[in-house]
């Protein structure tokens, strides 16, 4: 099965896990209709990423243009002093490995 992902990566610095969780929650709300939304956390480095999984490549490509997502990304850009990285992925789901 092919899936499509939209990743938003950002670095807030150490001690910012709760802030990252809040941003992740806002991005998840903006990703209504996605299959799954996850927050990647490297709390010691203060580096984070959100990945929304989509069935439709158009939904993945259009996520950053949704008004709700644009608002979160604009606030994040202001916080970072630059645009957060937004990337699109083609994803392939496979069976889990042996136990």
Image: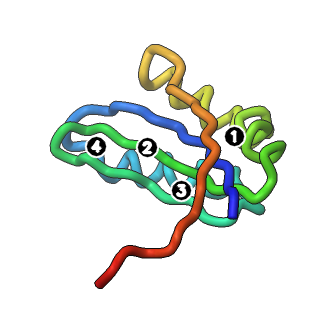
Marks 2 and 1 sit apart, C-alpha to C-alpha, by: 14 Å
Label 1: how many residues lie within 10 Å, few (<14), some (14-19) or many (20+)? some
Circle 2 sits on which residue? 49
Label 4: few (<14), some or many (≥20) within 10 Å?
some
User: What residue is disc 3 on?
Assistant: 25
First reached walking from the N terminus: tag 1 or tag 4: 4
- Per the image, label 2 sits on a secondary structure element best described as strand
Whether the residues at callouts 1 and 4 have beta carbons within 8 Å, the answer is: no
Disc 1 element: helix
Q: Looking at the rendering, which quadrant does residue 2 occupy?
A: bottom right
Residue wearing tag 1: 69
Circle nearer the N terminus (2, 1): 2
- The answer to which of marks 3 and 2 sits earlier in the sequence is 3
Whether residue 87 is situated above or below residue 58 in the rendered picture: above
The answer to whether 74 is drawn above or below residue 5 in the figure is above
Could you tell whether 98 is left or right of 87 in the image? left
Q: Which residue is mark 4?
A: 16
Give how far apart the Cα atoms at labels 3 and 4 are: 14 Å
Badge 2: residue crowd in 10 Å (few <14, some 14–19, many ≥20): many
Q: Which structural element holds mark 4?
A: loop
Q: Nearer the viewer, mark 4 or mark 2?
A: 2
Picture coordinates of residue 39 (x, y %)? 44, 54
Left/right placement of residue 73 relative to residue 22 reads right
**What colouring style does the render use?**
rainbow
Viewer-proximal residue, 41 or 68? 41
Among all residues in the image, which is located at the extreme top?
81
The quarter of the image holding the C terminus is: bottom left
Give the residue at x 54% y 56%: 25
Q: CA distance from mark 4 to mark 2?
A: 13 Å
């Amino acid at each position: 099965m092919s899936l499509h992902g939209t990743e938003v990566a950002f670095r807030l610095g150490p001690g910012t896990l709760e802030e990252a969780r809040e941003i992740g929650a806002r991005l998840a709300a903006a990703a209504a209709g996605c299959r799954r939304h996850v927050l990647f956390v490297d709390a010691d480095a203060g580096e984070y990423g959100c990945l929304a999984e989509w069935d439709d490549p158009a939904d993945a490509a259009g996520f950053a243009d949704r008004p709700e997502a644009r608002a979160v990304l604009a606030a994040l850009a202001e916080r970072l002093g630059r645009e957060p990285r937004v990337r699109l992925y083609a994803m392939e789901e496979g069976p889990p490995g042996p136990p």
